[in-house]
Image: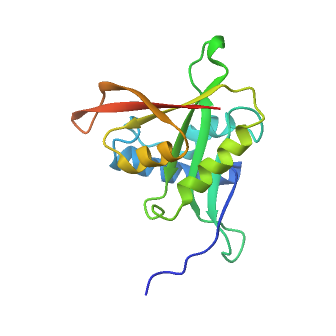
Amino acid sequence: MPPERREVQVRPGVESDLEALTELYNHYVRETPITFDTEAFTPEERRPWLLSHPEDGPYRLMVAVEAGLEGNSQRILGYATSSAFRPKPAYETSVEVTIYLAPDSGRRGVGALLYKALFEALAEEDLHRAYAGIAQPNEASTRLHERFGFRYVGTYREVGRKFGRYWDVAWYEKEL
């Protein structure tokens, strides 16, 4: 019998999420080419990243949690962020977005819930474009981004080396 499906809630990320968010991200660092980080992080090493995503402003962190669990613990199913696209001032109306799901959370609509919440939160910000870089191949991420109105703009060929091989990154943009 399949496990019971609980309701998914999306909320801003908070400091108490740091350990679970780090563990989730480290899965992708260790097991996949989806991120080009190559060494796992400790929660303390990830703290500056978490703190760079406040509850307001253009750089957000939205977290999907399983609702209805007993006690105060909420299992994190995934997260989505908007971050600075590039550090130069003329880029400040552009953001780079990214999404990471727990390995067992795919095909549940979690990614769509996260991006819906993130783009709603960003709607009132002075932003013009969102960009997403997707390490290839990653059909699920490509489909999600296209569903949210992203359009393909080009590919950086063999731009990253991980696990002894080179990986392409396809770039997508969305008008905000």
Residue 163 in view here: yes
Q: Residue at x 48, y 58 (%)?
A: 102
Residue 19 in the image: x percent, y percent?
58, 53
Q: Residue at x 71, y 32 (%)?
A: 58
Q: Residue at x 54, y 81 (%)?
A: 4
Residue 130 in the image: x percent, y percent?
58, 31
Residue 94 lies, with reference to residue 19, above or below; the image says above
Which of the 4 image quarters holds residue 142?
top left
Residue 20 in view here: no
Please give the count of numbered marks on the rendered protein: 0
Frontmost residue, 62 versus 43: 62
Q: Is residue 37 left or right of residue 97?
A: left
Q: Is residue 2 left or right of residue 127?
A: left
Residue 135 in the image: x percent, y percent?
36, 37
Q: Quadrant of the C terminus?
A: top right
Q: Residue at x 63, y 53 (%)?
A: 63
Residue 73 lies, with reference to residue 120, above or below; the image says below
Residue 35 lies, with reference to residue 114, above or below; the image says above
Q: Residue furthest left?
A: 164
Frontmost residue, 72 versus 122: 122
Frontmost residue, 56 versus 138: 138
Q: Quadrant of the N terminus?
A: bottom left
Q: Is residue 81 left or right of residue 15?
A: left
Residue 160 lies, with reference to residue 81, above or below; the image says above
